[in-house]
Amino acid sequence: MQATSRYNYYEILELTANAPQHEVTAAYERARSTYSGENPAIYTIFSEQEARELLVLIEEAYQVLGNKILRNIYDQRLLSGNASLNDLTYSSIVEASKQVFPEQRAEKTITSYKKNDAFEKEISTQDNWDGSFLKKVREYKQLTSQKISEITKINSYYVTAIENMDPENLPAVVFVRGYVVQIAKALGLDDKKVADSYMKNFKSGLGK
Amino acid sequence: MEKDLQKAYLESLDFKTSSAGKNADTKLWVVASGKGGVGKTFVSSSLGITLSKLGHSVVIIDLDLSGANIHTSLGLAPSHLNVRHFFEGVKGLQELVIPTPHPRLSYVQGFWDSWTPTDFSYSQIQNLIPEMKKLRADYVIVDLGAGALEAHLDLFKAADEKFLITTPEPTSIEKTYRFIEAYMCHSLRENSTPDAYGNMISTLRNHRQRTLEKPFSFRSYLKEQTGINYDFFEALSSAPVRLIVNSARSQSNYDLGHSMKSVCNKYYDLGIDYLSSIDFDNAVWQSVRVREHVLLSQPFTPLAGQFLTTCKQLIDPEELRAVV
């Protein structure tokens, strides 16, 4: 098989066009094990070079069919019948998917904030962590509670409740510790130190 | 011993009366392989035994030119009555059917007393095929010799179910592909002009010698050629060759069938069916030594289960489909 000639991705993975996603993955794994390594099944049929070329096609096919969004675009173009070969290449499909779903800005980038040496020092020497101090650090780092929620995947409602140290609006204590660890990490703090201190304060608040 | 034979012979004449009136739907199953010793005889006798246990009448015909041994695999003594009599025109095929001690199972002994080299001629095969279809049985299973001889391919093509046996060893895999190629070329020859066929054979030869610049594939080649009737692939795929991987010892041996299926698809554009893999089982060779078929001496093993599933799937695919 020539690597330059174009085959339908479904043909490459030997699937029907309505194959469910798990079959796509199974077919891909099967194809990969057939054409890579020392599988005796290709003996005397495909040379090593040919098998490698096939493997490239297989990987490409799975990049598209294994991804729901890309597969949808590919299916639409394939079924419309008037798509040119260029429209069915991997790069053109990835390009199209970017138009449909503009790439979101990387989530983890921390927004810039003005460095305040005095406050930095206060953070590093702080031993007694509580909700209000966490809030202070967050505001200092120019992060909204929504942003923290985006990074940590914790509901912003809980983020606010943690800052208010409000047990009424928080789940069981074990979960709270987990949340605090996540928030501390998002704020670039020493999560163990923060969580230990915070939980001490939090529990003493519960005790009264 | 002589008495037993006599009795068997007489019974074979009586056998005519059983399962009469079913001639129309006698199914012809042909078992072939590229390499010898991969278990054709074992698989054909096992399929026969399993089908007979499922209540179908079965005749196993031994057409191994290199020497008959279905009778040994069934644990029976060889009979002087054998398929040679049919080819010499002395007896009809139905008269050669020898019953076994097992209900609904009978067989036709292969060449056993020929001291001269045996071979099938084209006309012999053409005579044999309709005769096999006329046998009074639900299933006629043909055990062929190894290799892609002209006669084997003719029989293989005429079969309702075509079984190709391989083991996971590269030697066997290699010969299995050669068999598939021979089978395809054999079928192609009737569907193409002589020129186109000659061209294809020489291209193939160059490919084998690695003198072609580009990688070669039957599939892309045939699509580009004129003078070859390409449609027949559809027909070949609708009555697919059924691959059986015998003596599988591991998961990778089991997966081999899927891989070979994929290779056939990519290289030949030929849809084959991966029917099943048969586990390696020491009980098989042990029972051959004591000349008792393993499915009869040990009927409740996983091995017997594999044959049962395989046969059920072939007889009535709908029945198994509900299991997901």
Image: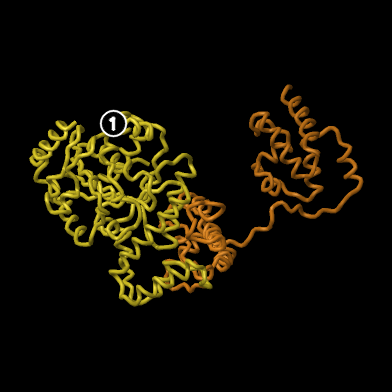
x, y percentage for residue B137?
16, 44
> Residue B277 at what x, y percent from top left?
40, 43
Quadrant housing residue B217 = bottom left
Say left or right for A177 vs A27: right
Identified at 50% across, 68% down, the residue is: B209
Q: Nearer the viewer, residue A7 or A111?
A: A7
Above or below residue A24? Residue A163 is above
Q: Nearer the viewer, residue B297 or B262?
A: B297
Q: Chain of mark 1?
A: B
Whether residue B189 can be seen here = yes
Q: Residue at x 42, y 67 (%)?
A: B218
What residue is at 78 percent from the left and 51 percent from the top?
A142
Colour of chain B, in one word, is yellow
Q: Reply above or below: A40 against B51.
A: below
Q: Which quadrant is the N terminus of chain B positioned in?
A: top left
Which colour represents chain A? orange
The quadrant the C terminus of chain B occupies is top left
In the orientation shown, which residue stands out farthest toward the top?
Answer: A208
Name the residue furthest front.
B115
User: What is the crowding at mark 1: few (fewer than 14 residues within 10 Å), some, or many (at least 20)?
Assistant: some
Applied colour scheme: by chain
* A92 and A62: which is toward the camera: A62
Whether residue A21 is visible here, answered yes or no, is no
Residue B7 in picture, x, y percent from top left: 12, 33
Count of numbered marks: 1
Residue type at the position of mark 1: Leu
For this view, does A142 lie left or right of residue B50?
Answer: right
Q: Name the spot of residue A43 as percent of width and height, x first.
A: 49, 56
Task: Say left or right for B306 vs B4.
Answer: right
Residue shown at the point (12%, 45%) measured from the top left: B95
Disc 1 element: helix
Q: Which residue is mark 1?
A: B296
